[in-house]
Amino acid sequence: MDNSVKSGSQNGLAFNPNVAALPPYNAGMNIAVARSISGRNDIARLASNENPDGCSPAVLAVLASPTLEPWRYADPACAALRAALGQRLSIQPDTIVAGNGSEELIAAVSRAMLVPGVGVVTVVPSFGLHEIEPLAQGAVVTKVAMTDDLSFDIAALEQAVASGPRVVFLSSPWNPVGPALDRKSLDRLIAAVRPSTLLVLDEAYFEFADGSCPDGLEVLRSSDIAFVVLRTFSKAYGLAGLRVGYAICSDAELARVVAAAKTPFNVNAAAQAAAIAALSDEAWMRASVARLRSERARVGAALEELGFRVASSQTNFLFFDCGRDSAALASALLQEGIIVKAWRERGYEAYTRLTIGSPADNDRLIGALARIARQ
Ligand SMILES: *Cc1c(COP(=O)(O)O)cnc(C)c1O
Protein backbone atom coordinates (compact mmCIF):
# COMPACT_ATOMS: atom_id res chain seq x y z
CA MET A 1 0.00 0.00 0.00
CA ASP A 2 1.19 3.50 -0.74
CA ASN A 3 -0.21 6.94 -0.27
CA SER A 4 -2.32 6.71 -3.43
CA VAL A 5 -4.98 5.00 -1.30
CA LYS A 6 -6.05 8.50 -0.30
CA SER A 7 -7.20 9.46 -3.78
CA GLY A 8 -8.31 6.04 -5.02
CA SER A 9 -7.40 2.37 -4.90
CA GLN A 10 -4.95 0.58 -7.17
CA ASN A 11 -7.92 -0.48 -9.28
CA GLY A 12 -8.65 3.09 -10.18
CA LEU A 13 -11.63 3.52 -7.83
CA ALA A 14 -12.26 7.08 -6.76
CA PHE A 15 -13.10 7.42 -3.07
CA ASN A 16 -14.96 10.20 -1.40
CA PRO A 17 -11.81 12.22 -0.58
CA ASN A 18 -13.29 13.53 2.69
CA VAL A 19 -13.86 9.99 3.93
CA ALA A 20 -10.60 8.54 2.62
CA ALA A 21 -8.65 11.26 4.46
CA LEU A 22 -10.39 10.83 7.84
CA PRO A 23 -8.20 10.42 10.92
CA PRO A 24 -8.74 7.02 12.62
CA TYR A 25 -11.05 6.81 15.65
CA ASN A 26 -8.89 6.12 18.72
CA ALA A 27 -10.84 3.17 20.18
CA GLY A 28 -9.85 1.39 23.41
CA MET A 29 -7.55 -1.61 23.01
CA ASN A 30 -9.08 -4.97 22.27
CA ILE A 31 -8.99 -7.38 25.22
CA ALA A 32 -7.39 -10.26 23.24
CA VAL A 33 -4.53 -7.99 22.18
CA ALA A 34 -4.11 -6.79 25.78
CA ARG A 35 -3.98 -10.41 27.01
CA SER A 36 -1.33 -11.38 24.51
CA ILE A 37 0.85 -8.34 25.25
CA SER A 38 0.56 -8.56 29.05
CA GLY A 39 0.48 -12.34 29.34
CA ARG A 40 -2.37 -11.87 31.85
CA ASN A 41 -5.92 -13.04 31.68
CA ASP A 42 -7.44 -10.57 34.15
CA ILE A 43 -7.42 -7.37 32.13
CA ALA A 44 -8.65 -4.16 33.79
CA ARG A 45 -10.45 -2.34 30.98
CA LEU A 46 -10.21 1.33 31.92
CA ALA A 47 -10.13 2.89 28.45
CA SER A 48 -13.68 3.03 27.14
CA ASN A 49 -15.81 4.50 29.94
CA GLU A 50 -17.88 1.33 30.28
CA ASN A 51 -19.84 0.63 33.46
CA PRO A 52 -17.96 -1.88 35.67
CA ASP A 53 -21.23 -2.66 37.50
CA GLY A 54 -22.73 -4.18 34.36
CA CYS A 55 -26.40 -3.34 33.82
CA SER A 56 -29.75 -3.70 35.53
CA PRO A 57 -31.07 -7.28 36.01
CA ALA A 58 -34.26 -6.01 34.35
CA VAL A 59 -32.25 -5.64 31.14
CA LEU A 60 -30.84 -9.18 31.35
CA ALA A 61 -34.36 -10.51 31.97
CA VAL A 62 -35.84 -8.86 28.91
CA LEU A 63 -32.95 -10.04 26.74
CA ALA A 64 -33.69 -13.64 27.81
CA SER A 65 -37.46 -13.26 27.46
CA PRO A 66 -39.49 -15.00 24.72
CA THR A 67 -41.13 -11.67 23.87
CA LEU A 68 -37.93 -10.83 21.99
CA GLU A 69 -38.37 -11.97 18.37
CA PRO A 70 -34.98 -11.78 16.62
CA TRP A 71 -36.51 -12.99 13.34
CA ARG A 72 -38.70 -9.85 13.04
CA TYR A 73 -37.52 -6.44 11.92
CA ALA A 74 -37.57 -4.08 14.87
CA ASP A 75 -39.70 -0.91 14.82
CA PRO A 76 -37.71 1.57 12.67
CA ALA A 77 -39.36 4.47 14.54
CA CYS A 78 -38.52 3.08 18.03
CA ALA A 79 -42.00 4.28 19.02
CA ALA A 80 -42.20 2.48 22.39
CA LEU A 81 -38.77 3.68 23.47
CA ARG A 82 -39.44 7.25 22.33
CA ALA A 83 -42.78 7.23 24.17
CA ALA A 84 -41.06 6.05 27.36
CA LEU A 85 -38.38 8.74 26.99
CA GLY A 86 -40.99 11.39 26.22
CA GLN A 87 -42.85 10.53 29.38
CA ARG A 88 -39.69 10.44 31.51
CA LEU A 89 -38.49 13.80 30.22
CA SER A 90 -41.90 15.46 29.75
CA ILE A 91 -41.27 16.14 26.07
CA GLN A 92 -43.04 15.30 22.82
CA PRO A 93 -41.81 11.97 21.37
CA ASP A 94 -41.79 13.53 17.89
CA THR A 95 -38.78 15.62 18.93
CA ILE A 96 -36.79 12.48 19.85
CA VAL A 97 -34.69 10.37 17.47
CA ALA A 98 -33.24 7.05 18.69
CA GLY A 99 -29.88 5.96 17.37
CA ASN A 100 -27.51 3.03 17.17
CA GLY A 101 -25.61 4.62 20.02
CA SER A 102 -25.50 8.39 20.21
CA GLU A 103 -22.50 8.05 17.89
CA GLU A 104 -24.86 7.30 15.02
CA LEU A 105 -26.73 10.49 15.85
CA ILE A 106 -23.53 12.55 15.66
CA ALA A 107 -23.19 11.16 12.14
CA ALA A 108 -26.88 11.75 11.35
CA VAL A 109 -26.80 15.35 12.59
CA SER A 110 -23.65 15.94 10.51
CA ARG A 111 -25.27 14.43 7.45
CA ALA A 112 -28.46 16.39 8.03
CA MET A 113 -26.77 19.77 8.53
CA LEU A 114 -23.43 19.90 6.73
CA VAL A 115 -22.26 20.40 3.17
CA PRO A 116 -18.65 20.82 1.97
CA GLY A 117 -16.96 24.01 3.11
CA VAL A 118 -19.29 25.03 5.96
CA GLY A 119 -17.87 25.64 9.43
CA VAL A 120 -18.14 23.52 12.57
CA VAL A 121 -16.86 24.41 16.03
CA THR A 122 -15.80 21.96 18.73
CA VAL A 123 -13.14 21.78 21.43
CA VAL A 124 -9.70 20.20 21.80
CA PRO A 125 -9.03 17.77 23.33
CA SER A 126 -12.12 16.47 21.62
CA PHE A 127 -14.45 13.51 21.42
CA GLY A 128 -13.15 12.07 18.14
CA LEU A 129 -16.49 11.83 16.34
CA HIS A 130 -17.33 15.49 16.94
CA GLU A 131 -14.53 16.14 14.45
CA ILE A 132 -14.58 12.99 12.29
CA GLU A 133 -18.27 13.11 11.28
CA PRO A 134 -18.19 16.79 10.21
CA LEU A 135 -14.95 16.13 8.28
CA ALA A 136 -16.68 13.25 6.50
CA GLN A 137 -19.19 15.78 5.15
CA GLY A 138 -16.39 18.10 4.01
CA ALA A 139 -16.97 20.67 6.76
CA VAL A 140 -14.15 22.83 8.09
CA VAL A 141 -13.66 22.13 11.82
CA THR A 142 -12.34 24.75 14.26
CA LYS A 143 -11.26 23.45 17.66
CA VAL A 144 -11.14 25.68 20.73
CA ALA A 145 -8.40 24.61 23.15
CA MET A 146 -8.99 23.96 26.84
CA THR A 147 -7.53 26.43 29.33
CA ASP A 148 -4.29 25.88 31.27
CA ASP A 149 -6.35 24.92 34.29
CA LEU A 150 -7.99 22.10 32.31
CA SER A 151 -11.41 23.57 31.67
CA PHE A 152 -13.60 25.19 28.99
CA ASP A 153 -12.24 28.45 27.54
CA ILE A 154 -15.60 30.20 27.61
CA ALA A 155 -14.41 33.50 26.14
CA ALA A 156 -12.77 31.75 23.16
CA LEU A 157 -15.75 29.44 22.70
CA GLU A 158 -18.15 32.37 22.81
CA GLN A 159 -16.21 34.06 20.05
CA ALA A 160 -16.04 30.90 17.92
CA VAL A 161 -19.78 30.29 18.37
CA ALA A 162 -20.56 33.91 17.48
CA SER A 163 -18.67 33.52 14.17
CA GLY A 164 -21.71 31.59 12.92
CA PRO A 165 -20.65 27.98 12.27
CA ARG A 166 -23.35 25.67 10.88
CA VAL A 167 -23.00 23.32 13.89
CA VAL A 168 -21.33 23.49 17.31
CA PHE A 169 -20.51 20.14 18.94
CA LEU A 170 -19.81 20.32 22.68
CA SER A 171 -19.87 17.53 25.21
CA SER A 172 -20.84 18.55 28.73
CA PRO A 173 -19.71 16.89 30.94
CA TRP A 174 -16.70 17.04 28.63
CA ASN A 175 -15.15 13.88 27.20
CA PRO A 176 -12.15 13.55 27.52
CA VAL A 177 -11.47 16.26 30.11
CA GLY A 178 -14.28 15.90 32.66
CA PRO A 179 -15.79 19.25 33.74
CA ALA A 180 -19.32 20.34 32.82
CA LEU A 181 -20.48 23.75 31.62
CA ASP A 182 -21.93 25.71 34.53
CA ARG A 183 -25.17 27.62 34.15
CA LYS A 184 -23.51 30.97 33.51
CA SER A 185 -21.19 29.59 30.82
CA LEU A 186 -24.00 27.73 29.08
CA ASP A 187 -26.12 30.90 29.09
CA ARG A 188 -23.22 32.88 27.57
CA LEU A 189 -22.79 30.34 24.77
CA ILE A 190 -26.53 30.21 24.08
CA ALA A 191 -26.60 34.00 23.84
CA ALA A 192 -23.79 33.86 21.25
CA VAL A 193 -25.56 31.32 18.99
CA ARG A 194 -26.84 32.80 15.74
CA PRO A 195 -30.11 31.69 14.10
CA SER A 196 -28.16 29.83 11.39
CA THR A 197 -26.26 27.70 13.95
CA LEU A 198 -27.32 24.39 15.51
CA LEU A 199 -25.91 23.79 19.01
CA VAL A 200 -25.36 20.09 19.73
CA LEU A 201 -24.89 19.42 23.44
CA ASP A 202 -23.63 15.86 23.91
CA GLU A 203 -24.62 14.81 27.43
CA ALA A 204 -23.30 11.23 27.32
CA TYR A 205 -22.22 11.61 31.00
CA PHE A 206 -25.25 13.60 32.17
CA GLU A 207 -26.20 11.07 34.87
CA PHE A 208 -22.77 11.32 36.55
CA ALA A 209 -22.89 15.09 37.06
CA ASP A 210 -23.72 16.61 40.43
CA GLY A 211 -26.20 19.32 41.38
CA SER A 212 -23.75 22.10 40.49
CA CYS A 213 -24.27 21.37 36.78
CA PRO A 214 -27.36 22.51 34.94
CA ASP A 215 -29.60 20.06 33.09
CA GLY A 216 -28.64 21.12 29.56
CA LEU A 217 -31.98 20.01 28.16
CA GLU A 218 -33.93 22.21 30.57
CA VAL A 219 -31.73 25.22 29.89
CA LEU A 220 -31.93 24.80 26.13
CA ARG A 221 -35.69 24.27 26.18
CA SER A 222 -36.11 27.60 27.90
CA SER A 223 -33.99 29.30 25.20
CA ASP A 224 -35.09 30.07 21.66
CA ILE A 225 -32.11 28.57 19.79
CA ALA A 226 -32.05 25.44 17.62
CA PHE A 227 -30.47 22.58 19.57
CA VAL A 228 -29.90 18.86 19.78
CA VAL A 229 -29.19 17.22 23.15
CA LEU A 230 -27.57 13.78 22.87
CA ARG A 231 -27.87 11.17 25.61
CA THR A 232 -26.98 7.50 25.73
CA PHE A 233 -27.66 4.20 27.48
CA SER A 234 -24.00 3.22 27.06
CA LYS A 235 -22.48 4.81 30.14
CA ALA A 236 -24.57 5.13 33.32
CA TYR A 237 -27.07 2.45 32.22
CA GLY A 238 -24.30 0.05 31.16
CA LEU A 239 -25.59 -0.87 27.68
CA ALA A 240 -22.49 0.04 25.62
CA GLY A 241 -22.51 -3.26 23.74
CA LEU A 242 -26.15 -2.95 22.67
CA ARG A 243 -25.78 0.46 21.01
CA VAL A 244 -28.63 2.77 21.88
CA GLY A 245 -28.70 6.51 22.40
CA TYR A 246 -31.06 9.34 21.54
CA ALA A 247 -31.25 12.90 20.29
CA ILE A 248 -33.71 15.41 21.72
CA CYS A 249 -34.31 18.12 19.13
CA SER A 250 -35.59 21.66 19.60
CA ASP A 251 -38.48 20.95 17.22
CA ALA A 252 -40.15 18.13 15.33
CA GLU A 253 -38.98 19.34 11.91
CA LEU A 254 -35.34 19.16 12.99
CA ALA A 255 -36.02 15.67 14.39
CA ARG A 256 -37.59 14.63 11.08
CA VAL A 257 -34.50 15.67 9.11
CA VAL A 258 -32.07 14.04 11.59
CA ALA A 259 -34.16 10.83 11.41
CA ALA A 260 -34.05 10.99 7.62
CA ALA A 261 -30.23 10.94 7.82
CA LYS A 262 -30.01 7.66 9.81
CA THR A 263 -30.39 4.13 8.49
CA PRO A 264 -34.00 2.86 8.77
CA PHE A 265 -33.55 -0.15 11.10
CA ASN A 266 -30.76 1.44 13.09
CA VAL A 267 -31.70 0.32 16.63
CA ASN A 268 -32.09 -3.44 16.83
CA ALA A 269 -34.88 -5.27 18.68
CA ALA A 270 -32.71 -6.31 21.64
CA ALA A 271 -31.42 -2.78 22.10
CA GLN A 272 -34.92 -1.24 22.00
CA ALA A 273 -36.27 -3.70 24.58
CA ALA A 274 -33.18 -3.34 26.77
CA ALA A 275 -33.32 0.46 26.77
CA ILE A 276 -36.97 0.44 27.86
CA ALA A 277 -36.13 -2.04 30.64
CA ALA A 278 -33.14 0.06 31.72
CA LEU A 279 -35.33 3.18 31.92
CA SER A 280 -37.80 1.29 34.12
CA ASP A 281 -35.05 0.55 36.65
CA GLU A 282 -33.73 4.00 37.42
CA ALA A 283 -32.82 2.82 40.94
CA TRP A 284 -30.15 0.48 39.58
CA MET A 285 -28.59 3.28 37.54
CA ARG A 286 -28.62 5.72 40.47
CA ALA A 287 -26.96 3.22 42.80
CA SER A 288 -24.26 2.48 40.24
CA VAL A 289 -23.63 6.18 39.60
CA ALA A 290 -23.30 6.79 43.37
CA ARG A 291 -20.68 4.01 43.67
CA LEU A 292 -18.73 5.27 40.67
CA ARG A 293 -18.76 8.85 41.89
CA SER A 294 -17.33 7.85 45.23
CA GLU A 295 -14.66 5.73 43.50
CA ARG A 296 -13.92 8.70 41.22
CA ALA A 297 -13.16 10.84 44.27
CA ARG A 298 -10.94 8.12 45.75
CA VAL A 299 -8.95 7.50 42.54
CA GLY A 300 -8.63 11.24 41.86
CA ALA A 301 -7.21 11.86 45.32
CA ALA A 302 -4.74 8.99 44.87
CA LEU A 303 -3.53 10.38 41.53
CA GLU A 304 -3.02 13.80 43.05
CA GLU A 305 -1.14 12.21 45.93
CA LEU A 306 1.19 10.68 43.34
CA GLY A 307 1.85 14.17 41.96
CA PHE A 308 -0.30 14.05 38.81
CA ARG A 309 -2.34 17.07 37.76
CA VAL A 310 -5.94 15.86 37.42
CA ALA A 311 -8.84 17.70 35.73
CA SER A 312 -12.07 18.10 37.69
CA SER A 313 -14.58 15.47 36.61
CA GLN A 314 -18.37 15.18 36.44
CA THR A 315 -18.07 11.87 34.57
CA ASN A 316 -17.01 8.24 35.10
CA PHE A 317 -13.42 8.96 34.04
CA LEU A 318 -10.41 11.09 34.98
CA PHE A 319 -8.09 13.03 32.65
CA PHE A 320 -4.64 13.82 33.93
CA ASP A 321 -1.26 15.14 32.89
CA CYS A 322 1.16 12.28 33.38
CA GLY A 323 4.23 14.48 32.82
CA ARG A 324 5.59 12.27 30.05
CA ASP A 325 4.47 10.73 26.76
CA SER A 326 1.18 9.11 27.71
CA ALA A 327 1.85 6.26 25.25
CA ALA A 328 4.81 5.23 27.44
CA LEU A 329 2.61 5.29 30.54
CA ALA A 330 -0.13 3.32 28.77
CA SER A 331 2.32 0.66 27.66
CA ALA A 332 3.79 0.35 31.18
CA LEU A 333 0.25 -0.11 32.54
CA LEU A 334 -0.54 -2.61 29.81
CA GLN A 335 2.35 -4.75 31.03
CA GLU A 336 0.37 -4.98 34.27
CA GLY A 337 -2.82 -5.89 32.43
CA ILE A 338 -4.43 -2.45 32.65
CA ILE A 339 -5.80 -0.67 29.57
CA VAL A 340 -6.09 3.14 29.69
CA LYS A 341 -6.38 5.67 26.89
CA ALA A 342 -3.25 7.62 25.97
CA TRP A 343 -4.41 10.90 24.41
CA ARG A 344 -3.02 11.39 20.90
CA GLU A 345 -4.27 14.79 19.74
CA ARG A 346 -1.39 17.12 18.99
CA GLY A 347 -0.35 19.15 22.02
CA TYR A 348 -2.10 16.77 24.44
CA GLU A 349 0.15 13.70 24.18
CA ALA A 350 1.07 13.95 27.88
CA TYR A 351 -2.54 13.34 28.94
CA THR A 352 -4.15 10.05 29.84
CA ARG A 353 -7.84 9.30 30.28
CA LEU A 354 -8.80 6.49 32.60
CA THR A 355 -12.22 5.08 33.31
CA ILE A 356 -13.36 4.54 36.89
CA GLY A 357 -13.59 0.77 37.22
CA SER A 358 -14.53 -1.66 39.98
CA PRO A 359 -12.90 -0.96 43.36
CA ALA A 360 -10.53 -3.89 42.77
CA ASP A 361 -9.48 -2.63 39.33
CA ASN A 362 -9.05 0.88 40.72
CA ASP A 363 -6.78 -0.49 43.46
CA ARG A 364 -4.74 -2.29 40.84
CA LEU A 365 -4.44 0.90 38.82
CA ILE A 366 -3.37 2.99 41.82
CA GLY A 367 -0.76 0.38 42.80
CA ALA A 368 0.63 0.19 39.28
CA LEU A 369 0.76 4.00 38.91
CA ALA A 370 2.58 4.28 42.23
CA ARG A 371 5.24 1.83 41.03
CA ILE A 372 5.58 3.59 37.67
CA ALA A 373 5.68 7.07 39.23
CA ARG A 374 8.59 6.01 41.45
CA GLN A 375 10.68 4.86 38.46
C1 LIG B 1 -19.32 7.51 24.88
C2 LIG B 1 -19.71 8.76 24.18
C3 LIG B 1 -20.65 8.76 23.18
C4 LIG B 1 -21.05 7.50 22.49
O1 LIG B 1 -22.03 6.87 23.03
P1 LIG B 1 -22.79 5.70 22.29
O2 LIG B 1 -24.17 6.00 22.68
O3 LIG B 1 -22.21 4.46 22.86
O4 LIG B 1 -22.58 5.80 20.82
C5 LIG B 1 -21.06 9.94 22.61
N1 LIG B 1 -20.53 11.09 23.02
C6 LIG B 1 -19.60 11.14 23.96
C7 LIG B 1 -19.03 12.46 24.35
C8 LIG B 1 -19.14 9.98 24.57
O5 LIG B 1 -18.17 10.01 25.46
Image (cartoon, rainbow, N blue to C red):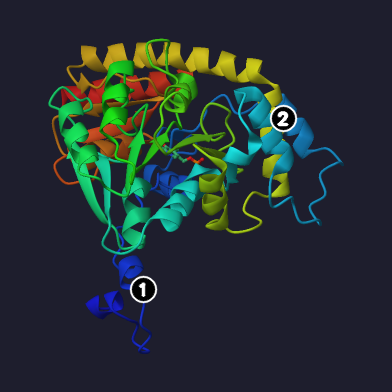
The answer to whether residue 257 of the structure is visible from this angle is yes
Q: Does any portion of residue 241 appear in the rendered image?
A: no
Q: Is residue 28 above or below residue 353?
A: below
Of badges 1 and 2, the one in the foreground is 1
Residue 155: x and y in percent read 16, 28
Residue at left offset 65%, top offset 30%: 86
Q: Report helix, strand or loop for mark 1.
A: loop
- The kind of residue tagged 2 is Ala
At label 1, the amino acid type is Asn
Task: Between residue 322 and residue 77, name the one nearer to us.
Answer: 77
At a point 68% along the width and 48% down the height, the residue shown is 77
SS class, disc 2: helix
- Is the C-beta of the residue carrying label 2 under 8 Å from the nearest atom of ligand 1? no
Q: Residues at badges 1 and 2 in contact (C-beta under 8 Å)?
A: no
Residue farthest toward the bottom in the current orientation of the protein = 11
The answer for how far apart the CA atoms under marks 1 and 2 are is: 40 Å
Reading the image, the residue beneath label 1 is 16
Which callout, 1 or 2, points at the residue further toward the start of the chain?
Answer: 1
**Residue highlighted by disc 2:** 277
In front of the other: 164 or 195 = 195
Give the image quarter of residue 352. Answer: top left
